[in-house]
């Protein structure tokens, strides 16, 4: 069971907007630690999409955005494209565990 | 541009020690948290631990009793040893660079599948 909780799956049609939630607790997200998001295409290594809650590395389209509030965070993807079909993971730090922690992952299906 | 590459045996027998090395190119090892992360088949990501360039380590409590990490900055490599492996340790093992404590992993190796089987 992951320290950060994500929905197992989300789906949307091309062009639509989807959001993926990441719920933590007072020892990780709620303690003020940053949330980061990764995209993992089947068979590949994860790639950072959002870091520091809402920052995009160069090369990541502005269709991807992140937000954080209290003990949770969200990844939003607008203008959904077929190539966005992948697994998405949130990640933070937990002070009670002194660990980097990941969410269980969310599989995005583009209908 | 930093590149990471894992290397090591793809098959390990139960009760033996899994040993992997990550080679770093294109960047200094200084001031980063060099981590190992694994992903069991069909499962999510699990952080195993980190080795700071100075030698400080921190391990996932669930694996702490079996894990040792080391670094050789002269060779630009860091290593993972996981003792007394079982089938539950079968996974793709990634090495990754952490920007700061609690920060994101901005560079990842391609991953290497390690199967534990007799």
Image (cartoon, rainbow, N blue to C red):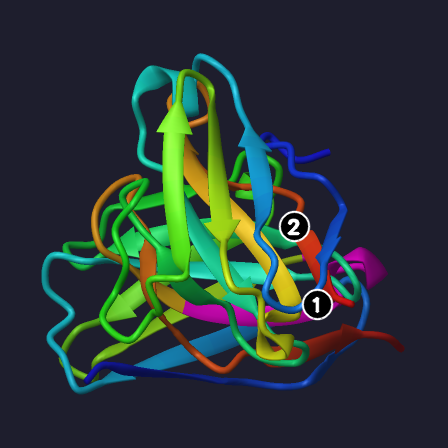
Q: Quadrant of residue B68?
A: bottom left
Residue at the spot 71% in from the left edge and 39% down from the top edge = A7
**Is residue B45 or residue B112 the one in the foreground?**
B45
Q: How many marks?
A: 2
Q: Is residue B77 visible?
A: yes
Report whether B37 appears left or right of B23: right
The image quadrant that residue B92 belongs to is: bottom right
Q: CA distance from mark 2 to mark 1?
A: 16 Å
Q: Is residue B86 magenta?
A: yes
Q: Position of residue B116 (x, y in %)?
A: 79, 72
Percent x, y for residue A14? 65, 69
Asked whether the beta carbons under mark 2 and mark 1 sit within 8 Å of each other, the answer is no
Give the magenta range: B84-95
The image shows residue B88 at horizontal and vertical percentages of: 80, 56
Q: Is residue A28 left or right of residue A84?
A: left
Residue at point 57% right, 65% down? A80
Of all chains, the one bearing label 1 is: B
Q: Chain of mark 2?
A: A
Q: Which residue is mark 1?
A: B91
Q: Is residue A18 above or below residue A49?
A: above
At 41% from the left edge and 61% from the top edge, which residue is drawn?
A63
Instruction: Name the residue beneath numbered marker 2.
Output: A105
The N terminus of chain B - image quarter = bottom left
């Amino acid at each position: 069971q992951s320290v950060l909780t994500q929905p197992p799956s989300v789906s949307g049609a091309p062009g639509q907007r989807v959001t993926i939630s990441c719920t933590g607790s007072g020892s990780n997200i709620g303690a003020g630690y940053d949330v980061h998001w990764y995209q993992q295409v089947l068979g590949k290594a994860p790639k950072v999409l959002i870091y520091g809650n809402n920052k995009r590395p160069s090369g990541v389209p502005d269709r991807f955005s992140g937000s954080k509030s209290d003990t949770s965070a969200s990844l939003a993807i607008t203008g959904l494209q077929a190539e966005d079909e992948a697994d998405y993971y949130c990640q933070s730090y937990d002070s009670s565990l002194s660990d980097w922690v990941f969410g269980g992952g969310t599989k995005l299906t583009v209908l | 541009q930093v590149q990471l590459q894992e290397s090591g045996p793809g098959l390990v027998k139960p009760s033996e020690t899994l040993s992997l090395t990550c080679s770093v190119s294109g960047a200094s090892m200084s001031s980063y948290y060099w981590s190992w992360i694994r992903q069991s088949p069909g499962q999510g990501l699990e952080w195993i631990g980190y080795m700071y360039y100075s030698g400080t380590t921190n391990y996932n409590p669930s694996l702490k009793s079996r894990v040792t990490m080391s670094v050789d900055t002269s060779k630009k490599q860091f290593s993972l040893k996981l003792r007394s492996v079982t089938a539950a340790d079968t996974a793709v093992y990634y090495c990754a660079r952490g920007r700061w404590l609690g920060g994101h992993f901005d560079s990842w190796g391609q991953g290497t599948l390690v199967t534990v089987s007799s």
